[in-house]
Image: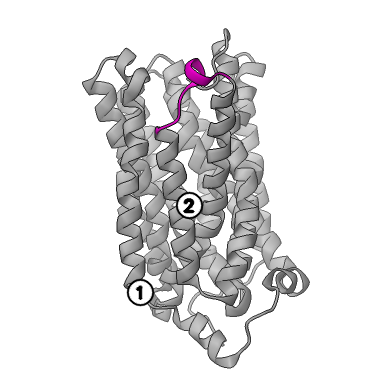
Amino acid sequence: LFFPTSDALTSQLLALASFALAFLIRPIGGIVFSHVGDRIGRKKTLVVTLSLMGVSTMLIGLMPTHATIGVWAPILLTVLRLVQGLALGGEWGGGLLLAVEYSPREKRGVYGAVPQTGALLGLALGNVVTSLLSAAIPEADFLAWGWRIPFVLSIVLVFIGLWIRHQIDETPSFRLVASRRTARRVPLFTTFADHWRSVLVVIGAKVIETSTFFLFATFSISYLVGLGFKRVDALNMVLVAAVVAVPMMLLFGGLSDRIGRKTVFLVGTVVMMAYVPVFFWLLSLGSPLIATAAIVLGFSVIWSTYGSVLGTFFAESFPADVRYTGVSLGYQVGAALVGGPMPLIATALLAQYGGSYVPIIVFLLACGAVSLVAVGFTRDRSGMALDD
């Protein structure tokens, strides 16, 4: 609708490129909003980022397509995607810190896993609406107007989120910084000067989490359709996996409180590296039941190990006065490097090598190796005081 060409592959690549482009601006959003979050407060920042995300998402649902306004359609769509990326760059860090900085020391892993489930619940909710629409209306109607409904409906979540955030106070960690008057004038400079190693560790740890998240959540849908599965069936497979992953995230978050964040992360990464080749082989069998089981095992169980502890591990890597900046910068740079581009990279590799999934496996194994090195040499701070 927005990137029409005579070549279906080119159209798909252009659409995925617009998806990836928003990730490139997420570090900028992280820098801008984390500066505000570390100096003025987590709560105020989250109100702004949620409003930006909600309005831009709703406007995508109201956008005229290429058939109506020509080249302006993909341009305006890309602009709105960039606004989304800017908002999410500041949103994730603030949401995470609200959970972690309010948590008891012995339950920090569980509390930190909760905001991570938000992405899964959002993914499930989006897939439910899209799947129901795909099943309820003809393909032509879905392409004409049905696809707009999920985007417009998302404004409801904005009002719910704003109401929730209005009820909460600033976190204990930020109040401690404010009472001691230790807020940094430019948190970004302090982060680069004193905590650059932690930033690199966070970026490296993010690589395996973000690449495999979008393997299951995004790329697997188009890949399954290319194998001959129905789009509705592919959406439902990811939907089931996302729902099952929510309690698994809380389970592994609680486990990290007992055996340590580092152990859970490293074991999960190694298991995922062993599973990736098996995953593609299982999909190639062509069985909907086996494909569903493959996505559930990879997404709901294995990904949830390191996905659940990622946020808490990041928060424990920085002091309170630059924590928002540190976690946002590392997380969003990692996502920009491989997360957003992952579906685009995988699709391009698939086309370049005649449909072989082996190059995709090699790419994901490289991502796993980077994360193993990054986390392997860090100190596990599980159970330690968050703010000494």
Residue 262 in percent (x, y) is at 55, 64
- Mark on residue 182? none
Q: How busy is the neighbourhood of tag 2: few (under 14 within 10 Å), some, or many (20 plus)?
A: many
* Quadrant assignment for the C terminus: bottom right
Q: Residue furthest bottom?
A: 180
> Marks 1 and 2, how far apart in space?
20 Å
Q: Position of residue 381 (x, y in %)?
A: 55, 75
Determine whether the residue tagged by mark 2 lies in a helix, strand or loop: helix
- Magenta part of the protein: which range? 62-70
Q: How many marks?
A: 2
Q: Where is residue 240 in the image (x, y as percent from the top left)?
A: 30, 38
Q: Dot 1 surroundings within 10 Å: few (below 14), some, or many (20 or more)?
A: few
Q: Is residue 86 above or below residue 217?
A: below
Task: Give the residue displayed 30% in from the left and 57% down from the top.
Answer: 160
Query: Which amino acid, by three-letter code, is at mark 2?
Result: Leu
Secondary structure at numbered mark 1: loop
Q: Which amino acid does label 1 sit on?
A: Ile
Q: Nearer the viewer, residue 3 or 55?
A: 55
**Label annotation for residue 52:** 2
Say which residue label 1 marks.
Answer: 168
Residue 104 quadrant: bottom left
Residue 202 rendering spot, x and y as whole percentages: 63, 60
Q: Say whether residue 195 is visible.
A: yes
Residue situated in front as seen by the camera: 64 or 91:
64
Q: In this view, does 326 lie to the left or right of 55?
A: right
Residue located at (63% from left, 47% from top): 25
- The image shows residue 17, relative to residue 87, as above or below, that is above
Give whichever of discs 1 and 2 has the lower sequence position: 2
Looking at the image, is 338 positioned above or below residue 71?
below
Q: How is the image coloured?
A: one colour
